[in-house]
Each structure stands twice: as C-alpha cells, then as structure tokens.
Image (cartoon, helix red, strand yellow):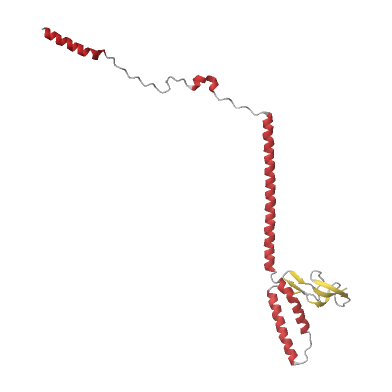
C-alpha cells in the first residue's frame, strides 16, 4: 500500500515542472505603417512641406526681357547674313552657268579671229587678173581653199556682215569716210572697204565702209 502511494507521488513530481514552464507566445506581426516610428509628415508638420516658389522681381523680368531682345537681334542678323550669302551664291552660280554657255557658244571665236587676216589675203589675191592658164589654175585652187575655209567657219557660226546698200549700223559697220552718192539714201553704206564678220550674234570685226551723206 505504501509502495503504491510512493510511486504516485514520484509521478506527480516528474510531471509538475513541465506544467509550470511558461509557453512563450510569438509576437504577432505588425501591419505596415503601424511601426513605432512616426511618419515624416507627422513629425515635421508644416515645417516639412516644400517651400513655395519665389515670384521673380521686376529687375529679373527686365533682365530676362533684355536677354530675349538681344537673342532676337542676333537671330535676325544671322538670318540676314544667310540670305545675303545665299543671294551671292545664286549670283555666282548664274554667272558661272552663263560663262559656260558663252564659252560653248563662242568656242570658235579665238580661231575665227585669227583666220580673218587669212581671209583678207585670199580675197585680195582672188582679185588679181589672170593672164595665162597657169595663173588661172592657181587662182581656181586658191578660190577652192577660200570657199572651203568659209564653209568650215560657217559651220561654227561665222558669217560675213552684209554692208553695201544697208543702212549704216554703228554696231556692224565702221564708217571711214562719207561721200555723195546718187541713188542712195543718206546714211547708207555705198562701198565696203574691208569685210566684217560676226560669230552668231557677236561681232568679230565690223565692216569698214563708205557711207552716203
């Protein structure tokens, strides 16, 4: 009997410490925003708010306006300079194109001018009276060369200037003398002393003429 009571008491002593140990409770998670720190907006109050922008003064407005006017003046000057440069470039391009066209149009001018004395010599030689067959044959050969030369120049636009019977034109004719001439109106070419030539619409040499009074 006593032995059974002793076992019961030992069992109670063994279980008792386990019942007396306190159970640690896990801390419940705190929701976001509910931590112990105080928000900056609440901590600082009105002092934490951003300061309002300061309105510009009259002096600052005047300085800004002056700067705008200065920049507009510079822009206008640069625009005028650009327009002048563009106009100069267009004029240069137009002159260059005209010069190229003129060079192509009058490319035979230098050669034709050098050949005019040769034509004069041919014309003087062909006026000689041939007194024998040999001289006539030589003159015929010279005339063929003269005609071939004229044809070659004509293909390049070189033509003789009409003079006799035409009204005097100071652009085409060079008057070296005046004379009374029946059957001609005043200021009319009555005689050609030296032929004139032109290359297309450009005079290479005016004709030397005698003009009626």
Quadrant in which the C terminus is drawn: bottom right
162 vs 3: above or below: below
Which of these two is toward me, 144 or 88?
A: 88
Residue occupying the point 50% across, 19% down: 43
Residue occupying the point 69% across, 36% down: 66
Q: Is residue 81 left or right of residue 42?
A: right
Regarding residue 167, the answer to whether it shows in the image is: no
Q: Is residue 4 left or right of residue 148?
A: left
Q: Quadrant of residue 153?
A: bottom right
Quadrant in which the N terminus is drawn: top left
Which of these two is toward me, 51 or 154?
A: 51
Instruction: Residue 125 in the image: state x and y as whole percent.
Output: 77, 84
Instruction: Residue 21 in the image: state x and y as whole percent.
Output: 27, 14
Which of these two is toward me, 213 or 79?
A: 79
Residue occupying the point 87% across, 74% down: 177
Q: Quadrant of residue 186?
A: bottom right
Regarding residue 14, the answer to whether it shows in the image is: yes
Instruction: Residue 117 in the image: state x and y as whole percent.
Output: 76, 77
């Amino acid at each position: 009997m006593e032995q059974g009571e002793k076992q019961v008491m030992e069992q109670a002593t063994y279980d008792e410490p386990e019942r007396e140990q306190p159970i640690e409770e896990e801390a419940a998670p705190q929701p976001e925003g509910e931590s112990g720190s105080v928000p900056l907006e609440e901590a600082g109050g009105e002092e934490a708010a951003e300061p309002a922008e300061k309105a510009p003064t009259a002096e600052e407005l005047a300085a800004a306006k002056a700067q705008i006017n200065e920049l507009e003046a510079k822009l206008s000057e640069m625009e005028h300079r650009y327009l002048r440069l563009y106009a100069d470039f267009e004029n240069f391009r137009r002159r260059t194109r005209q010069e190229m066209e003129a060079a192509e149009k009058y490319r035979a001018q230098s050669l034709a001018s050098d050949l005019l004395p040769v034509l004069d010599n041919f014309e003087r030689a062909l006026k000689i009276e041939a007194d024998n067959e040999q001289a006539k044959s030589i003159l015929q050969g010279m005339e063929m060369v003269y005609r071939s030369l004229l044809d070659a120049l004509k293909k390049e636009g070189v033509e003789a200037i009409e003079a006799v019977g035409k009204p005097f034109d100071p652009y085409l004719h060079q008057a070296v003398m005046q004379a009374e001439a029946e059957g001609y109106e005043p200021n009319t070419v009555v005689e050609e002393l030296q032929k004139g030539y032109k290359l297309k619409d450009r005079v290479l040499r005016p004709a030397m003429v005698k003009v009626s009074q």
